[in-house]
Image (spheres, grey):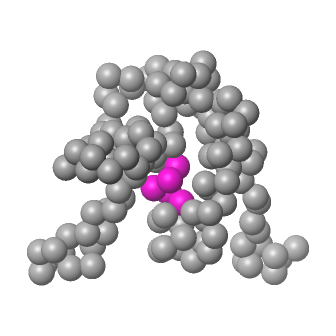
C-alpha cells in the first residue's frame, strides 16, 4: 500500500522514503515500527549499492521520537540535501557511489552532538 500511495501522491521516490507502522491490535497497542518503503533489496545484498536514504530517515525518526534526539530529522534532511547536491548518489539515483560512500558523506555532514554523560567526564 505504501508504494501505491507514494505513486499516487508523489512523495519523492519510494527508494528514499520510510514509513511508520502503528499496530492497532489491543495486544500490541503502542508498538511502532519504522521501515523502508522499498523493501529489503535482497537482490543487491553484498554489492554495496543499496540506496541508504530510507534507512537513514527511519533512524532519524527513531532518534528524534524515541531517544530524545531533538532536531535529528531536520539535521538528517539537511545532510541528505547537501550530499545529494554534491552528487553523492547510489546508482539507482543516477550516481556512481557505493552505499558506504553515501553513508560516509552523510556522517560527515551531520553535526556532532556529545551526550551529557560524556561531557560530565570531560
> Residue 94: x and y, percent?
54, 22
> Residue 110: x and y, percent?
71, 53
Residue found at x 33% / y 39%: 38
> Residue 3: x and y, percent?
26, 44
Height in image: 69 above or below 18? Answer: below
Quarter where residue 97 is shown: top right
Residue found at x 76% / y 60%: 112
Q: Main secondary structure of the magenta part?
A: helix
Relative horizontal placement of residue 47, taking residue 109 as reference (left or right): left
Q: Nearer the viewer, residue 46 or 20?
A: 20
Q: Is residue 63 shown to the viewer in this render?
A: yes
Q: Residue furthest front?
A: 9
Q: Is residue 98 shown to the viewer in this render?
A: no
Relative horizontal placement of residue 109, taking residue 23 as reference (left or right): right
Height in image: 119 above or below 41? Answer: below
Number of marks present in the image shown: 0
Q: Residue furthest right?
A: 122
Point out the stretch of residues depicted in magenta: 56-60
Q: Nearer the viewer, residue 47 or 86?
A: 86
> Residue 33: x and y, percent?
32, 62
Relative horizontal placement of residue 99, taking residue 44 as reference (left or right): right
Q: Is residue 118 one of those drawn in magenta?
A: no
Amino acid at each position: 500500500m505504501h508504494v501505491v500511495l507514494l505513486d499516487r501522491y508523489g512523495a519523492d521516490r519510494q527508494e528514499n522514503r520510510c514509513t511508520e507502522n502503528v499496530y492497532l491490535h489491543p495486544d500490541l497497542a503502542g508498538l511502532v515500527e519504522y521501515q523502508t518503503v522499498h523493501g529489503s533489496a535482497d537482490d543487491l545484498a553484498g554489492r554495496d549499492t543499496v540506496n541508504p536514504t530510507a534507512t537513514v530517515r527511519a533512524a532519524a525518526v527513531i532518534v528524534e521520537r524515541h531517544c530524545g534526539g531533538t532536531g535529528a530529522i531536520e539535521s538528517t534532511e539537511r545532510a541528505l540535501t547537501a550530499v545529494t547536491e554534491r552528487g553523492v548518489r547510489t546508482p539507482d539515483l543516477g550516481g556512481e557511489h557505493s552505499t558506504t560512500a553515501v553513508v560516509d558523506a552523510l556522517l560527515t555532514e551531520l553535526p556532532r552532538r556529545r551526550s551529557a554523560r560524556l561531557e560530565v567526564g570531560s
